[in-house]
Amino acid sequence: MSSLLLDSRYHFKRRDRVCADAYTLWQVCSGLVRTVTWGEDGEVVPLGLWSPGSIIGVPISQVEPYELQCMSAVELERLPLEYPLTVEMLLKHTTQVNRMLQIMHCRQVQERLLQFSCWLAENFGQPTSYGRLITIRLTHQEIAETIGTSRVTITRFIKQLEAEGLLRWSGRERFVSNQALKAHQRELMIA
């Protein structure tokens, strides 16, 4: 491994923020990163959640201001602006953005929360007999910001979805049921 590659890797803690510039791409090596911008009123506008292998930055998103928020311990690799982006990389980025847009356009907040939870389980989950265990920890506030609602609403709907047997969201465990995941897959096939 070259010394240039060693010098281009950075480690961040949960809740660290990384300001992005127009000349830098970042590859997520480990952890979960949320990218955001802000509306005219200063409200956070989430752009996506990114996992290992994702390449992110202003050169791809074309959005400024742009910030990377570490949702877990994260390792990022700084890539030069001239880094060769493949069609596969760009398609992965576009697919992710489109999926988040699809979730955001669920009219009912409860359905939006369920779709987002299923997406998290599929992308950051481990199979169990109940369904999938979500292996990342997001606060109710972080979920609320990501799907465009309030923390209080998220808490209320999590309780409702638990009562319906679609989620188990207590203590340190966050599960999405097999029933919810199957319904989610049907929704994706229709969309």
Image (cartoon, rainbow, N blue to C red):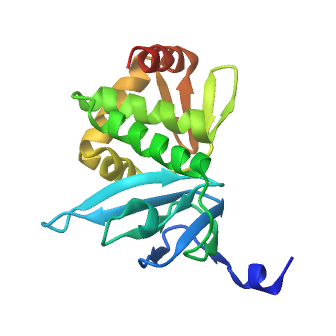
Q: Position of residue 96 (x, y in %)?
A: 47, 43
The residue sitting at 21% across, 63% down in the picture is 43
Is residue 91 positioned above or below 52 on the image?
above
> Is residue 61 rendered to the left or right of residue 16?
left
Is residue 57 positioned above or below 2 on the image?
above
> Is residue 55 rendered to the left or right of residue 107?
right
- Nearer to me, 87 or 137: 87
Q: Quadrant of residue 19?
A: bottom left
- Image mark count: 0
Is residue 9 positioned above or below 103 on the image?
below
Q: Position of residue 120 (x, y in %)?
A: 52, 39
The residue sitting at 54% across, 67% down in the picture is 14
Residue farthest toward the right in the current orientation of the protein: 1
Q: Quadrant of residue 103?
A: top left
> Is residue 95 rendered to the left or right of residue 64?
right
The residue sitting at 65% across, 54% down in the picture is 53
Q: Position of residue 143 (x, y in %)?
A: 38, 47
- Nearer to me, 102 or 138: 102
- Quadrant location of the N terminus? bottom right
The residue sitting at 34% across, 25% down in the picture is 160
Is residue 48 positioned above or below 36 on the image?
above
- Quadrant location of the C terminus? top left
Q: Position of residue 73 (x, y in %)?
A: 62, 65
> Is residue 24 rendered to the left or right of residue 98?
right
Q: Quadrant of residue 158?
A: top left
